[in-house]
Amino acid sequence: IYKMESVRDWMRDYRIESGYDELDIVGSVNEQMSSEEIAAKIRDDLGIPDHWFLNCNNMRESFKFIRNCLEDNQVVVMMTGIVGNNTNRPLNVEEFRAFAMTDEHAPLIFINNCDTDSGKLFSLLHEAVHIWLDKNDFFNAVSIEDDTYDKVEKICNETAAEILMPNQLFAEYWKQSEI
């Protein structure tokens, strides 16, 4: 976390000194909005259609596509699967999947590279929602039954799922499959 803070701080200073404006995406949604409204806003900001996933052949391509969209919008996305530079200390996915650090100039998402391709994609979108809500995320909720699980985590999960496969499209595909 400290290493990523220094990356974020460096990028923040660089962007301020270079005259970059604050990013409008940070804090552009709120907890009173529905997950569908938040997902639509994020897709709009990233310039991706509801059916973006049809252009990707697998989870790895989907992750790369979303990562590129985030980076095109000045969100810093970092990944590693080890602690610091120690190749003998892998990051445990059960303990740590991802986190988000919000900042008006240099929001940062960190992804544990030891996760599965689908896990990395979901985590990337979940953490992106934290950026749009302007809520830092260092907590790794184990389950919804967990006493520490809160409304923001629920919104982030629902919105990530909505970006992955909008409910309306899912219903349409489901109806077509019944024929």
Image (cartoon, rainbow, N blue to C red):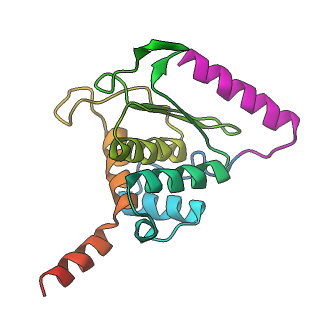
Residues in magenta, as a range: 1-22
Residue at the image position 20 percent from the left and 28 percent from the top: 146
Q: Position of residue 74 (x, y in %)?
A: 67, 46
Residue at the image position 73 percent from the left and 44 percent from the top: 22
Q: Position of residue 77 (x, y in %)?
A: 57, 39
Q: Position of residue 62 (x, y in %)?
A: 44, 56
The answer to which quarter of the image holds residue 145 is: top left
Note whether 168 is above or below 59 in the view shown: below
Residue at the image position 24 percent from the left and 29 percent from the top: 142
Q: Position of residue 174 (x, y in %)?
A: 19, 76
Note whether 89 is above or below 21 in the view shown: above
Q: Is residue 6 magenta?
A: yes
- Quadrant containing the C terminus in the rendered view: bottom left
Instruction: Characterize the magenta stretch by its predominant secondary structure.
Output: helix
* Residue 99 in view here: yes
Q: Is residue 128 magenta?
A: no
Left/right placement of residue 41 relative to residue 178 reads: right
* Residue 34 in view here: no
Note whether 128 is above or below 177 in the view shown: above
Towards the viewer: 45 or 170: 170
Residue extending furthest toward the left:
178
